[in-house]
Amino acid sequence: MRVAYVHTDPLPSSMGGVVATVHTARGLADAGVQTRLLVPDGGGSLEDALARYGLNHVPGLRVERPCAIRGRIGPVRIAWPRRYYRAVSHRLQRLHREHALDVVVVRALKLAAWLVRDRAPGGAGRACPVPLVYEAHNWYGDLERKWNDPSDLVETRKLESEQRLRDVEAELLPRVDGLVTVTGPMLSLMRERVAPGTPLAVAPMGVVPPERLPEPCREPTLVYVGQLHPHKGLGVALEALSKLPATVHLRVIGGPAHLDRWQERARALGIAERVAFTGPVPHAQVAAQLARARIALLPLRDCFYNRYLTSPVKLGEYAAAGLPVVASRLPVLEERGRDDEHFLLVQPDDPHELAAAVRRILEDPALEGRLRRGIRGKLPEWSWRRRCEILRALCVRVIEHDRSES
């Protein structure tokens, strides 16, 4: 099977999506798929870019950068995406002529819509000559429902952007040949918009399982890693820390957006000396930071986005570090594992319950050991390899469905 995997994050770049894109493309190749990764040129030589992401010698994987970035990456001017879209379309047509592509997987909404703009539902067109699978990382179908909670804290500019994306998504979904989402709840929201019989799948974000887990840290140090936007729940974690003994500390890895806000909040709660804000940390250094902690926090607030749409990469990173996790009881997390076996689930937005769960782990070695073993056992299921096996199986179904419709 020959697959083109296409995204809009440049290679190399500091944009978070490029890491997931690289791991997915590599995982497809590891799963026996002849894979072409098409991404924009982020500068420098292709050889250096491949070395940066460990892609130099991956059997079955070829990386191409059909369009160079000029000027700022984001927000980009309209001219740059259109130029890249045309370059992708021309390259897909050539790949199909020379190598008989079987399917194209696209994880960028506007690019996917552009590639199917000239085709009838379920049919090939000039821009994309083979079946197209859309890999959805967000949903825009009902913005009133999505952003009706004050804790969502959506900015006016973001809402206006999503209103435009809602129209793009409505045009795209009936035309895709396959749909894969990062959460089951997201798929339940989108499946009614695709054509009947369209192959569907759920493939959460993955993690690279370590060769061996680090030795458990014995210091009562908590850790939070990731974005610091209010709906991620760091404010709840800070309040929970204020209710725990003074010997308990928290490391916050992430930023710089909203970093000043949470530093001020820690001072107001009288816990500034117990919170270490590292700021942004290169992805390759996150594992070393996690090894210095004993318990990991995933205190997502209770809002529509967190209930249905997020697939936290940090959950896999916590598992790769072998850390017991205290997380919010939300559908996207309940589908990933069982309470009291793989992690402890607590009521969202409740610092008292979050603090009580942390105290349970610190005071109960048997519980701590059970949670470490439980989340460690999830690593094969949460790996990039497993994600790509799901994606590969979906592509096979898409190809078979396309042939049966021909």
Image (cartoon, rainbow, N blue to C red):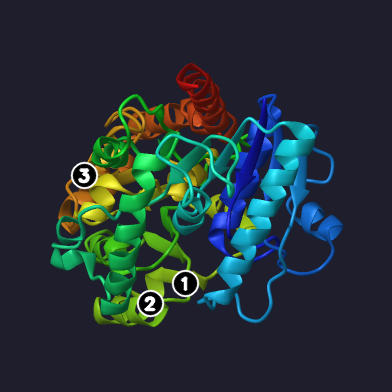
**Along the viewing direction, whichever of 172 and 308 lies nearer the viewer:** 172
Q: Earlier in the sequence, mark 2 or mark 3?
A: 2
Residue 6, percent from left and from top: 60, 49
Residue 346 is marked as 3
**Along the viewing direction, whichever of 346 and 245 lies nearer the viewer:** 346
Secondary structure of the residue carrying tag 2 is: loop
Q: Amino acid at mark 1?
A: Gly
Classed neighbour count for the residue bearing mark 3: other residues with Cα under 10 Å, few (<14), some (14–19), many (≥20): many
| Whether residue 102 is situated above or below residue 284 in the rendered picture | above
**Residue identifier under label 1:** 255
Q: Amino acid at mark 3?
A: Val
Residue 110 is marked as none
Secondary structure of the residue carrying tag 1 is: loop
Q: CA distance from mark 1 to mark 3?
A: 25 Å
Residue 387, percent from left and from top: 52, 32
- Residue 82's quadrant in the figure? bottom right
Q: Is residue 224 left or right of residue 52?
A: left
Q: Residue at x 43, y 39 (%)?
A: 176
Q: Is residue 381 left or right of residue 258?
A: right
Residue 344 appears anywhere in the view: no
State yes or no: discs 1 and 2 in contact (Cβ < 8 Å).
yes
**Residue identifier under label 2:** 258
- Residue 175's quadrant in the figure? top left
Residue 390 appears anywhere in the view: yes
